[in-house]
Amino acid sequence: MQNILSILFCLSLFYLAVTPRVKAYVAVLRFQGILLTILLMVPFVEQFSVFAVILPATLFIIKVIIIPRYINKIILELDIKRTIEPTIQQFNFLLLVIFSFIVIFLASSILSLTTNIETIPFASGFAAVTVGIFIIIFRKKLIVHVCGFLVLENGIFLFGTAVASDLPIMIEIGVLLDVFVVVFLMGIALNRISSTFEGFDVTILRRLKD
Amino acid sequence: MLEFSVLILIPLIAAVVCYLIKSIRSQYVISLIVGAFHLLFSFIIFIGLYKPNLPFFFSTDSLSKLFLLILSNVYFWVVLISFSYLKRPVTLKAQEGKKYYFLLLNFYLFANTAAILSNHFGMYWVAAEATTLSVAPLIYYYRNEESLEAMWKYLFLVSVGIAFAFIGILFLTLSANGTIMEGQQLFFSEFVKNAAKLNPVWLKASFIFIFVGLSTKIGIAPMHSGDVDATSNAPSPIAALMSGSLRITALLGVMRIFQILTPTSSYEFAKLILIIGGLLSLIVAFIFMFKVNNYKRLLAYSSVEHLGIITLGIGIGGLAFAGAMFHTIYNSLNKMVLFFTAGNIHSRFKTREVNGVSAVINLMPWTGWLFLLSFFAISAIPPFGIFFSELMIFRGMLFSDKPWILAITMFLLLFIFINMGRTLFQMLYGEKEEKNIQEKESFEIIHFAAIVLLILLIAIGIISPGILQENILSISKDFGIRL
Amino acid sequence: MELTSILQGIISLVLILGLSPLFVGLVNKQKAIFTGRIGASLLQPYYELMKLIKKETINATSSSFISAVTPMINFIAVVIAAAMLPISFAHPLISFEGDIILFAYMLGLARFFQVLAAMDIGSSFEGMGAAREATFAVFAEPIFFFTVGSIAFISGFTSIYDIYHSIRLDNLSFVVFIIVCSISVFILAVTECSRMPVDDPNTHLELTMIHEVMILDNSGIDLFLYQYSSYIKLFIYVILEASFFYPFAVQSYTLGIIIFLVVIFILSAALAAVETITSRFKMKNIPHYLLFATAIGILNLLIYTFTR
């Protein structure tokens, strides 16, 4: 089950690599949030405990409901144009993504020989981190950077389930809240940027230089 | 429970109270009381009068005691001068931000204390990210374009960096695979105990990820840019807070993982990485000192330089390690004075450009002289503390297996000193412009703080209290270094 | 080969040839319903084919023998490919080790001659269409090999019939492969058969056409062959995709056939829905779309190779 979800996660990453729309990014983030929630719910099939519901519930609320809504609200309020404005050709971007997928899967299969890891979620999580970084590097819009950051965070989350580290619930929720507040602050900053600067590109952020 | 409540809960409660109270003056008083209590308590803990016994994921050891003291010291002085700083006129837009100032400061104290005292890597991560979140809005204090850009860059870069550190923490879990640590919680003290059994490949990967990730927050090259932007555009108390305590907190994370690596085969590798990071920071500071025209940026690069020296010292080991620990103390004291006085200069001249500032000594004698003295202090001129710690680091380098590093460091530091001095002297002396002649500046609380801090800097350096030496010896012992 | 299996093969070939226009009619009907029209009758494609047979064939004066033979070659190649496909449990007429390659290149041959014939006429429009068709074919071919090829790789067989019969759904990861593969085969079908997001079969502007522009100058029996073979081609891909779902009903024949029909119906609905809700991509975006499908195939292969 974990594998299926991770593969769907990979598909969503490919979709991110080809789609030219900002809205689609938000939709993908929502989709990934749902996948991660299901991933957390899987152990419940065997044993159910009310206490363990807290984490998936928080995850669902934050990653599926609040954050996508918040980003959509920003897009709507600031009237951000719907294309993502890539700095390299989408085609090359996709090639880059495919190439990094190959490298990551190769590397994690080698690593899984010596260590006990779930290869597919491990590799997908790492791939998501890479794609998140690529999105941040090769896109101009700041809101897309926020989305890239969230993809990266989702990847780390998936990755965390793959290495079977069970952090205490308090800390997991702390991580989620931290991510949420980061996005919240970035949203406020974007609001300010829209009223201070003209546009939402990284190109406007060039005052600070040596 | 007492120590837990004083150190961690009370700042959080104070933050909530600051949210409820509208008057800035009472917010200030509350924060100051909290800061004083915090300082008192961490001092008591530091000198060993009180044996703390913290619940949950928290605990203390020599390292966290030292860093806690540094944090509460910096925090206390920053809060002390904050009120006079807040009274300075700002634009209308920035006025509304003031009401969150103490709230965020208190939250910062809460988060940072939690980060320093945490014994669990997950807890450390959450708390360290929370410090970023509390500092980011403070950077945007002036509500202008530069500070907005600096805040965005800092928030983004550090968040991404710290996400990488999280990957490193997950790798640490992996390294425990197949040992008795498997499936255990990420308690740092447990990892230190069982370090030799961990998987070296994952441990190395973990170290690299945590180091690179946190170096965005420490502000060492090549990930320094966000930190430099933030430090140079934040209001001076916040810049002092960042340079003095926030960077140290991030350094703590790196030192934790470094400590785990100490007894393993990856030790040399980790040392090499730290040395490279330190040298790179020195080189970056060296290059940018040539072209920087903004004195706050200059100070930010000076922070990069000194954190680089500390990292270098930790990487070299031996005597240099102890020197680095001393250096963290002196650097935090010294950076406070520098940023406080620079803040005074900024509010007088309304510019951060070096060219717009001249004859500071004549116009603002208190600030000017203190600025000059703190510049001497940061350039390791005796009898200021940094002289002793740098001497220690240099001796450590000389007697290590890589003495050539000393030559490079000395060369870089010399040029950094020359360039920094050239710029600062131009500001301090220089031609007096007619329009700038106003009334002589009065003695303010900032000057008082600066004088006390400078005296502390000299006193600690010369007296070198036994309790401090003992503490640093015990830290060195934790890191497997015999002095 | 036994007589029954030959008989099965012949029956399935006849079924493919006979039902393919019906499938197109089904798609068109649903599309009409989705857009709120009543639409033409389900049998409309048959009527159109009948009409074309009755018309006179005229070839351009500048064309050579290639234009004359191409429709026939095209049709025969597609029919041979169709003969390699198993319908439900029936053994196909042509089946041997490695026929998956022959299958791919029979379709390739058909396309090659079509491109050649389009250039043969010498019209600039047709040349443009040929160029486009050839370009997109470059991107479309890896999709086939990475998706169907990865399943071949996983099952260890190289014959279409054996590949499909080796799929077992008791293994969960096979389900994933099927989900993943069916997405990319769907994209492949859309591309190869010039359906909506890639090419608009109903457009009236030659500049935006891909496939239709190549057969602008054909008429009568030639056009009939072209049209018919394109219907068959679409049906081939549909069967290719529907065949993934055999294993659900390995136990029972009737259930197998029902599932097969249901899947075909769902696919027609999906095609109609996609054609209704999407508009044609910009030409420069089509390679992304195709590379996306290739990426899915590569992902499939990666997952299989590295996670056994």
Image: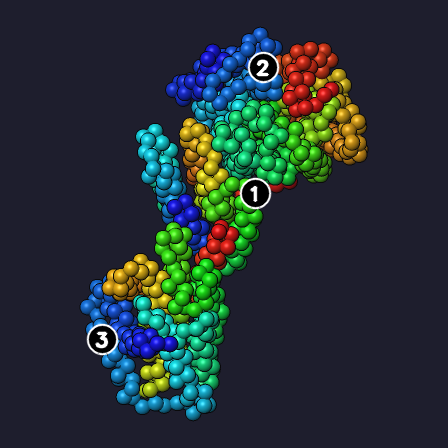
Q: Is residue C83 above or below residue A56?
A: below
Q: Which mark is residue A114?
A: 1
Question: Is the Cβ of the residue at disc 3 closer than 8 Å to that at disc 1?
Answer: no
Q: Residue at x 58, y 38 (%)?
A: B202
**Subunit that carries the residue with mark 3:** C
Q: Residues within 10 Å of mark 1 (few under 14, many from 20)?
A: few
Q: Residue at x 64, y 21 (%)?
A: B478
Q: Which mark is residue B445?
A: 2
Residue A138 place in picture, x, y as percent: 53, 51
Q: How many marks?
A: 3
Asked whether C91 or B260 is in front, the reply is C91
Q: Secondary structure at mark 2?
A: helix
Q: Which mark is residue C43?
A: 3
**Subunit that carries the residue with mark 1:** A
Asked whether B39 or B32 is in front, the reply is B39
Say which amino acid is labelled 2: Ile
Q: Residues within 10 Å of mark 2 (few under 14, many from 20)?
A: some
Q: Secondary structure at mark 3?
A: loop
Question: Is the Cβ of the residue at disc 2 closer than 8 Å to that at disc 1?
Answer: no
Residue A43 place in picture, x, y as percent: 37, 38
Residue A34 place in picture, x, y as percent: 36, 43
Closest to the camera, between mark 2 and mark 1, is 1
The scheme the figure's colours follow is rainbow
